[in-house]
Amino acid sequence: MTRRVACCAACLAVAVASAGCATSGRGPPGPAAANRAAITVGSFDFPESALLAYLYAGALAAKGYPVRVLPGLGTRELVDPALMAGLVQLVPEYTGSALEFASLGRIHAVASVAATATELARSMAARRITTGRAAAAQDGNAIVVTAVTAARYRLRTISDLARVARRLVFGGPPECPERPYCLPGLRQVYGLRFRQFIPLDAGGPLTMQALAAGDISVALLFTTDAGIRARHLVILADNRGLQPAENIVPVLRRATAARYPGVLAVLNAVSARLSTPALVPLDAQVQLDGRAPRAVAEHWLRAQGLGPARQGAP
């Protein structure tokens, strides 16, 4: 662990220890009522992850489990150690990236949803982490250009970038140079070396703004990003299969699952209803309309019959 990560991890520990409950059990007294130790749900530092944290936490709260949400904790390099140390007990993950990280790159995720989820469950079990049901919803890396750039260089696939990459500036998450499905993968699988890399954010507004302003020519965004469609951006086809299955899956400390035996069933009920077509408009409400992730999550859970009834409702 680098000095910077160690320092950030220490700060994260303090933040987790001092944080108040963002969500609490508001439904009828459930099986957790006798023991009020909160289940802390952490998220990565991008809007969709916070939304997912509130979805899973809200379903648990509706069943009477004591939960709190700590959104935007940081990258996987910080959130994963927090999960292992018990600072958080539940994290919404993405199967392919989680497998690559948990196995230290020894096991490579593939496009098969079932195979990737199975390998992830095996790797996490060795770390005393339980995986829930993988949702049908996927959100993977997307290599994106503007329509103008696509037309200018005749870009349809990522392979097409090989002709012009050395003239183009690439933008994406600060951790991109170390992530196997970002710059290292683009270099190894596609032979791409860009003129410059500019660290921005994880599929967030900075990357989108830089692409629209022409500060970067190619960006890494996420496939469910509503801004891609709203801005008529072009996702280049991953014609050599770099990106793996990235299904959303809740990962939970085994001790927490044992302490609250009904928790996994609640989490799995959320995953069972979460498809990519369902997730995209939820992301749009957060990213484009500026709605709070918690409010969006609560509305969706009620519509699915998984959230608390409105006060005063029969």
Image (spheres, rainbow, N blue to C red):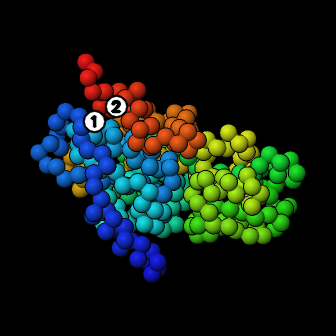
How packed mark 2 is, by other alpha carbons closer than 10 Å (few <14, some 14-19, many 20 or more), is many
Residue that numbered label 2 is attached to? 306
| 288 or 216: nearer the viewer | 288
Q: Position of residue 118 (x, y in %)?
A: 44, 50
Q: Earlier in the sequence, mark 2 or mark 1?
A: 1
Q: Is residue 16 visible?
A: yes
Secondary structure of the residue carrying tag 1 is: helix
User: Which mark is drawn over residue 267?
Assistant: none
Q: Is residue 182 above or below residue 305?
A: below
Q: Position of residue 21 (x, y in %)?
A: 27, 51
Q: Position of residue 314 (x, y in %)?
A: 25, 18
How packed mark 1 is, by other alpha carbons closer than 10 Å (few <14, some 14-19, many 20 or more), is many
Q: Residue at x 37, y 29 (%)?
A: 302
| 264 or 70: nearer the viewer | 70
* Marks 2 and 1 close (CB-CB < 8 Å): yes
Secondary structure of the residue carrying tag 2 is: loop
- Picture quarter containing residue 272? top left
The kind of residue tagged 1 is: Ala
The kind of residue tagged 2 is: Leu
Residue that numbered label 1 is attached to? 62
